[in-house]
Image (cartoon, rainbow, N blue to C red):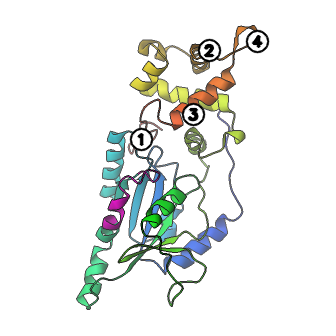
Amino acid sequence: MSDMQYIQWFPGHMTKTKRQIQSSLKLVDAVAEIIDARIPVSSRNPDLNKLIQNKPRVILLNKCDMANQTATKMWIDHYAKQGITAIAVDCKSGRNLNKFPAAVNTVMKEKIQRLQAKGMKNPMMRIMIVGIPNVGKSSFINKIAKQNRAKVEDRPGVTRGNQWFTISKNLEMLDTPGVLWPRFDDKIVGEHLAFTGAVKDQVVDVELLAMRLLDFLKKLKPAEFISRFKLEETELDSIESHELLSIIGKKRGMLISGGEIDTERAAIMLLDEFRSAKLGRITVEMPNGELR
């Protein structure tokens, strides 16, 4: 199924957001970027590198509980080779969020040492949080700010109107002033975002999307997917995805009048089960591009 439609999603406020981020960068020492651990390429804004330039960065691979653990480790190693600190987190449960302050201190080590040499015992570090919609930025802020709910008061050097939160005694966090959006120049990006539910199902053909997901699952052959739908691994290579969707619908008893299979209902169910990791902990994109 190579004719997956292009998803268009270019809000007019993107330019304004870029300007806001650039003007706020001078207020912070580092940037924390939240991405989806299942789709680390597609869940990023490709302009971000240019926007933040030389600012130290921490990458948070969110939804790690749904991603393949080996793949997540490969991504962390991949970023480390680029000199970027990355940690696997789950913003809903709060898993590994306690590692975040230490990760910031690691990337800010040189600056902290310079300030300490000047007599500042516990220098305050400020970090800006960025991420595209539906990647978990709100969950991250709610979870981490709840542990220390104090909002930073207006004071010199902290722009009025920006959302600042205290994370620890020497770390303050700025919520992004505006929203970054993904770019869909590559239709695969839109498709992968749709797999994870980051793009609303109302703007895509769910049956076509489910068939594209089945194209991927047939190659990957995750054990949970095969056992959940009582499939034969050997038959996956020879069966077309539209036929497989019908088989899955039939196995779940999704029939309409006349014994016809309700493939739309089957598609919705398949996507829901993928998004809730019932088909296994699956990473769609690998650092070597293998699964793209």
Identify the residue position indicated by label 3 in the image: 272
Residue type for callout 3: Asp
Q: Which residues are magenta?
A: 90-103
Identify the residue position indicated by label 1 in the image: 67
Nearer mark to the viewer, of 2 and 1: 2
Q: Residue at x 50, y 29 (%)?
A: 216
259, above or below 62, in the image: above
Sequence order check, earlier mark of 3 and 2? 2
63, above or below 140, in the image: above
Closest to the observer: 215 or 274? 274
Q: Which quadrant would the N terminus be assigned to in this image?
A: top right
Measured in 3D between alpha carbons, the distance from the residue under mark 3 to the one under mark 1, in whole angstroms, is 15 Å
Measured in 3D between alpha carbons, the distance from the residue under mark 2 to the one under mark 1, in whole angstroms, is 29 Å
- Secondary structure beneath dot 4 equals helix
Residue type for callout 1: Ala
Closest to the observer: 38 or 173? 173
- Secondary structure beneath dot 2 equals loop
Q: Which class describes the residues within 10 Å of circle 4: few (<14), some (14-19), or many (20+)?
A: few
Q: Which class describes the residues within 10 Å of circle 1: few (<14), some (14-19), or many (20+)?
A: many
Identify the residue position indicated by label 2 in the image: 253
Sequence order check, earlier mark of 3 and 4? 4
Percent x, y of residue 130:
51, 64
Label disc, if present, on residue 257 of the rendered structure: 4
Q: Residue at x 42, y 52 (%)?
A: 61
Measured in 3D between alpha carbons, the distance from the residue under mark 2 to the one under mark 4, in whole angstroms, is 12 Å
Measured in 3D between alpha carbons, the distance from the residue under mark 4 to the one under mark 1, in whole angstroms, is 38 Å
Residue 91: quadrant of the picture: bottom left
Left or right: 245 with respect to 262?
Answer: left
Label disc, if present, on residue 103 of the rendered structure: none
